[in-house]
Image (cartoon, grey):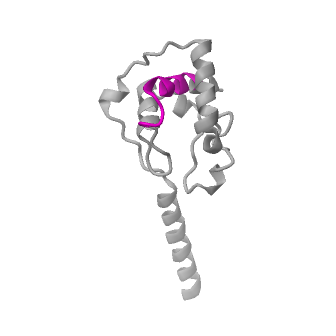
Amino acid sequence: MRTMKLFFVSALVLLVGTTLVAQPKPWVVPDSFKSMKNPVAQSDASTKAGLAVFTKNCASCHGKAGLGDGVKARTLKDFPGNFSKTDFQSLADGDIFYRTKTGRGEMPKYDGKLSDDDIWNVVNYMRTLKK
C-alpha cells in the first residue's frame, strides 16, 4: 500500500513538474511596439523580399513554411513556433517586428544584422503563412 501511494505521489509530482517546465514564458512586448504600424506596404515586392530574408535567416529553425520544423528545430530546447496558427497571426505587426528585432533565448537578435525594412518585409511575408 505504501509503495503504491509513493508511486502515485511521484507520478503526480513528475506530471505537474513537466507541465510547469513545458509552458513557455510569456513574451512581453512593450506597448510602443504593439501599437506600431508597419511602414512597408504589403505588396508582391515586399513579400518576395521578405521570403528571401526569411529563407536566409529564419527557415533553418522555423521551416520553409514557418511551421517550426526547420532542420535546426530539433536541436532547440523550445519549439520555435508555428506561424500559420491563429495565435501567431493574431499578433500585431509591431509585436512580430519587436520579437524579430530583439530576440530572446534561442531566438537570435536581428537588431544590427537586418535593417528595419528587411524585418518589416519578413513580417509581411509571415502574414502569407496563415492557414
Q: For the point 36% across and 36% down, which residue is it?
A: 29
Pick the quarter of the image with the N terminus.
Answer: bottom right
Q: For the point 54% across and 87% down, which residue is it?
A: 2
Q: Is residue 105 above or below residue 39?
A: below
Residue 115 visible here: yes
Q: For the point 56% across and 72% down, which residue is it?
A: 11
Front in this rendered view, residue 61 or 30: 61
With 71 as the anchor, is 17 left or right in this view? Answer: left
Q: Is residue 118 above or below residue 66?
A: above
Q: Position of residue 36 (x, y in %)?
A: 37, 22
Pick the quarter of the image with the C terminus.
Answer: top right
Residue 122 lies in the magenta stretch: yes
Q: Position of residue 125 (x, y in %)?
A: 59, 24
Please state the extent of the stretch shown in magenta in the rendering.
111-125
With 114 as the anchor, is 49 left or right in this view? Answer: right
Q: Position of residue 39 (x, y in %)?
A: 43, 16
Q: Position of residue 25 (x, y in %)?
A: 43, 50
With 36 as the anchor, is 53 left or right in this view? Answer: right
Q: Main secondary structure of the magenta part?
A: helix
Front in this rendered view, residue 91 or 32: 32
Front in this rendered view, residue 120 or 29: 120
